[in-house]
Amino acid sequence: MNALPGRMLMHVFGRAARALSPRTARVCRNTPHSIRGLAGSARPTGLRCEAGLPEVHRAVHIRTVGSGGGPEALELTTLPLPWDELGPSDVLIRVASAGVNRPDVLQRRGLYPHPPGHSPLPGLEVSGHVVALGPSVPLHRLALGDAVCALTNGGGYAEFCVAPHEQCLPIPVGLSTTEAACVPETFFTCWHNLMQQANIFGERLLDRPQPSVLIHGGSSGIGTTAIQLCRAFGVDVLATAGSKMKCRVCMDIGSRVALNYREIESWDEAVLEATAGQGVDVILDMVCGSYAQRNLRALKVGGRLAVIGSNGGYSATNLDLKSLMRKRLTIGGSTLRARETALKGTIASELLSSVWPLFDRRDLRVLLDSSFPLEKAPEAHRRMESGAHIGKIALLVDQPGSGML
Ligand SMILES: NC(=O)c1ccc[n+]([C@@H]2O[C@H](COP(=O)([O-])OP(=O)(O)OC[C@H]3O[C@@H](n4cnc5c(N)ncnc54)[C@H](OP(=O)(O)O)[C@@H]3O)[C@@H](O)[C@H]2O)c1
């Protein structure tokens, strides 16, 4: 990864955030409680935490009984603060906004259960302020009051959420807290799959000056991130999307070619045409199923397929596996959520050094489709499932003037 541009620039964590008005800190004592019949969780000892935190907060949970997994299964409730989830290396964040992601929809529908040890509540990314730090969070990493965006282990649709300190990053320069909440899940996923797993810049080692990539679902949260990220690093980007308008957005944010898959079924042919018959080095695929064979066809010799979703189903028939040998192709895939904190920490530090400076330079932005108050989480999911959105959807939790907390 040393060849990546922008690598030398380093942020001082929390630089801007420390300008916040000082908050009263204290070491918390163990104060078990029971509020309105809720079994309160014990506050761990040895924490550094803000004074005056409430005993309970509003959070969205997934109602499993009698809900059928529809959007109405998302129910606003009152819960004790999640002290029981807070380990020695974790922080508690007062949430300003939470990002909505397709995996949340799958979790709600019972198709993507939370990994053991993770919060069962939905919400994989937030922005907000640090209000408590576990005793093992290094002093130089974070302080009370720091503004952060964080990849969480669930529980983001809430007023307070726990995240490992390794998964917290400063709010990128120029972004609102709502935009910042929409950064972690897609940037961690795209960076890991494109840069670390598919090693898009491996091509440079082979003396091919410009790698190429095909991004399926180019107008999705993941797609809009992947297109901008690749373009910012000088990759030749091609994308697919499901309407003229979505294709136009893909081109606006850096795709050289955008193919409307509803009009061009043989998009693999179109990819070959657009690349002088060569194909692309890497494909980021969230469709799977019927796309599998066309993906193999659209890959260049030595190409890599990175599977991150299966909107088109899990099984593929009539695969020409000979092309794996003939073209020396590699098929890989991953899901981010269940991966270990150390890996997510590595992704976070690479993002901080290589990608956050691109926000400073306005080379990256968040395409925010819509935002909804926390209690309208079912509406946010309906919007996502309609497929009408372009870019990201956010939940507004603690916004100035909202009077929510
Ligand atoms: N593996 C991981 O770690 C990881 C992490 C995060 C997300 N993901 C996956 O990445 C995908 C995008 O997530 P997101 O949060 O950005 O969701 P999103 O904004 O709702 O995007 C879903 C995308 O899937 C496309 N799509 C759905 N069915 C399709 C089909 N049959 N053919 C072609 N395209 C189809 C849609 O394209 P059109 O609108 O153009 O039809 C849309 O752009 C999801 O599959 C999600 O599960 C994986």
Image (cartoon, helix red, strand yellow):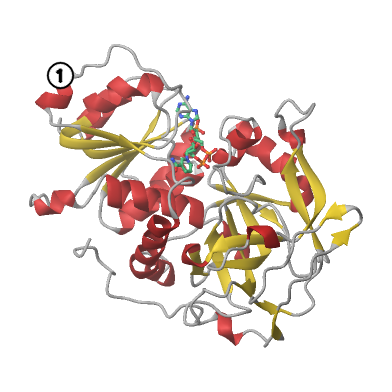
Query: Residue 307, image x and y in percent?
Result: 36, 35
Q: Position of residue 342 (x, y in %)?
A: 40, 59
Q: Which residue is mark 1?
A: 322
Establish if 361 lies above or below 290.
Answer: below
Dot 1 alpha-carbon crowd within 10 angstroms: few under 14, some 14 to 19, many 20 or more:
few
In this rendering, position of residue 335 left or right of residue 306: right
Above or below, 179 against 140 in this view is above
In the image, residue 201 above or below residue 361: above
Judge from the rendering whether residue 286 lies leftward or rightward of residue 183; answer left or right: left
Q: Residue furthest top?
A: 318
Q: Nearer the viewer, residue 112 or 371?
A: 112
Task: Say if residue 277 shows up in the picture.
Answer: yes
Most foreground residue, 271 or 121: 121
For the point 49% across and 46% down, the residue is 337
Instruction: Judge by depth and name the residue closer to the eye, 262 or 155.
Output: 155
Q: Looking at the picture, which amino acid does disc 1 mark? A: Lys
- Quadrant including the N terminus: bottom left
Taking the image as shown, residue 39 lies to the left or right of residue 206, namely right
Disc 1 is placed on an element classified as helix
Residue 254 in view: no
Q: Residue at x 12, y 29 (%)?
A: 327
Residue 216 picture quarter: top left
Left or right, 139 with reference to 134: left
Picture quadrant where residue 131 is located: bottom right
